[in-house]
Image (spheres, rainbow, N blue to C red):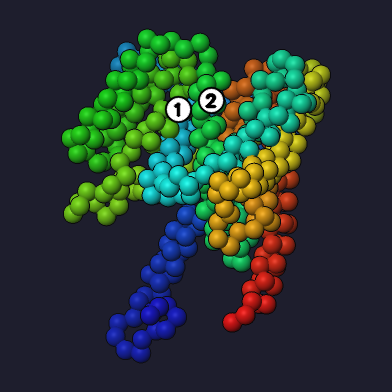
Amino acid sequence: MNTYTTPRPSGPRTPLFLSFADRVGAFLSRWSHAEAAGGIVLLLAAAAALVWANSGWAGSYEALWHTPLSLGLGPWQLSQSLHFWVNDALMSVFFLVVGMEIRREMHSGALAQPRQALLPVMAALGGVVAPALIFLAFNAAPPLRNGWAVPTATDIAFAMGVLALLGRGLPPALRVFLLALAIIDDLVAVLIIALFYSGGLQWSQLLVAAAGLAGVFLLQSLGVRRAWAYVLPGAVLWWGIWQTGAHPTLAGVVLGLVTPVHALAGRESAAPVERVQADLHPWVAFGVMPLFALANAGVPLQGAGTAGIDAAGTSAVMWGVALALVLGKPLGVLISCWLAVRLRLCALPPGMGWGDTLLAGLLAGIGFTMAIFIATLAFDSEALLNAAKLGVLLASATAAVLGLGWGMVLRRRHAADATVQPA
């Protein structure tokens, strides 16, 4: 029984201050793990970046992220801009969580059974191909076509956050389907980054990365389960991948995929893949991702020359990204799912209809974090990069509004269907 709502008539009473502190602590705990909360903070950070970059203090915005920041250990020194440390170092933690989510789902989640995973796999592939084709229809000429992968990814936190805002009344299978779709989307995005957005690889540096990964496996074989013990070999892996010419955030994915999925009997209450992910979630949702948005969403809406979004060719990139996410994602998801069901390769999850599948496709159009991240890799031109970012922001906001609107319609439909069903 809840002692806050039903106080006992006798015995020592809990001090009012402690009761209030407990309530605040419980609220903060629920808030830090709420999916919608992360999306709200992410949106606020992006809005702050837009306002800052288009205010009278725009110069300070640019200067901040170009500020050099050095880390050193004895003779070893690494000096890079603050923007680098956010995009290439802190985002490795984000990709670590993504890798662990993929690992967990492949072990015991929606991706564990091949037939069960087939529908979200087909949906994700359709949601990658259709947006890429729409973008290329607008941007066939180089270097514009380099951004073909920008509208292919889904922001897991933002999409799941919008779905959480809709509350109850939608099929439980929809959440699992959207989560699996977003995870596979991010897995495809990671493969795209590795294959298409890595420079000329220095294969000799793979030995350094291999040494870091070997250190991880050595610690695992010795039964080391403390997460902090893996920081050093993980840093070696990160450094080695960076030196090869590939993007260093791939180190986070690799570490996530090799995280143990079994708890040690008598020693652990949860497997490392679950425990570490839960520990990192608040830091990623309320630290890494908002900081990334603050550092990358500051697009100048008016400008001149090559720095603004009015330069030649940039409008095609902006509208190509926006339409690819808003239209291409739901179309790709719907068509690929329809074909899979039509060919009897799989069936829609219990309780889900085609309207629910459309909702998943609309929410998958919220690219945001991953889409902006790929844009930073795709374009060297500041004008094209700003145009792509603006397209991502415009599309993500539109997809979120459309998803919320259609979700409310579906919720009423499901409620009406439930009332007419025989008892």
Local packing at callout 1 (Cα closer than 10 Å; few below 14, some 14-19, many 20+) is many
Left or right: 15 in relation to 95: left
Local packing at callout 2 (Cα closer than 10 Å; few below 14, some 14-19, many 20+) is many
The earlier-in-sequence mark between 1 and 2 is 2
Could you tell me if residue 239 is visible in this image?
yes
Dot 1 corresponds to which residue?
250
Dot 2 corresponds to which residue?
193
Q: Based on the displayed image, in which of its 4 quarters is residue 128 positioned?
A: top right
User: At x 72% / y 51%, what residue is drawn?
Assistant: 401
Q: Which is nearer the eye, 94 or 339?
A: 339
The C terminus - image quarter: bottom right
Question: What amino acid is at disc 2?
Answer: Ile
Could you tell me if residue 41 is visible in this image?
no
User: At x 53% / y 37%, what residue is drawn?
Assistant: 186
Instruction: Check the image and report above or below for 208 versus 103.
Output: above
Give how far across and how far down residue 136 sits, in percent. Answer: 73, 25
**Cβ atoms under marks 1 and 2 closer than 8 Å:** yes
Question: What amino acid is at disc 1?
Answer: Leu
The N terminus - image quarter: bottom left
Instruction: Check the image and report above or below for 207 versus 147.
Output: above
Give how far across and how far down residue 103 sits, in percent. Answer: 40, 41
Give how far across and how far down residue 241 sits, in percent. Answer: 41, 20
Q: Which is nearer the eye, 123 or 346?
A: 346
Instruction: Check the image and report above or below for 6 versus 136.
Output: below
Describe the element under mark 2 as helix, strand or loop. Answer: helix
User: At x 66% / y 20%, what residue is drawn?
Assistant: 146
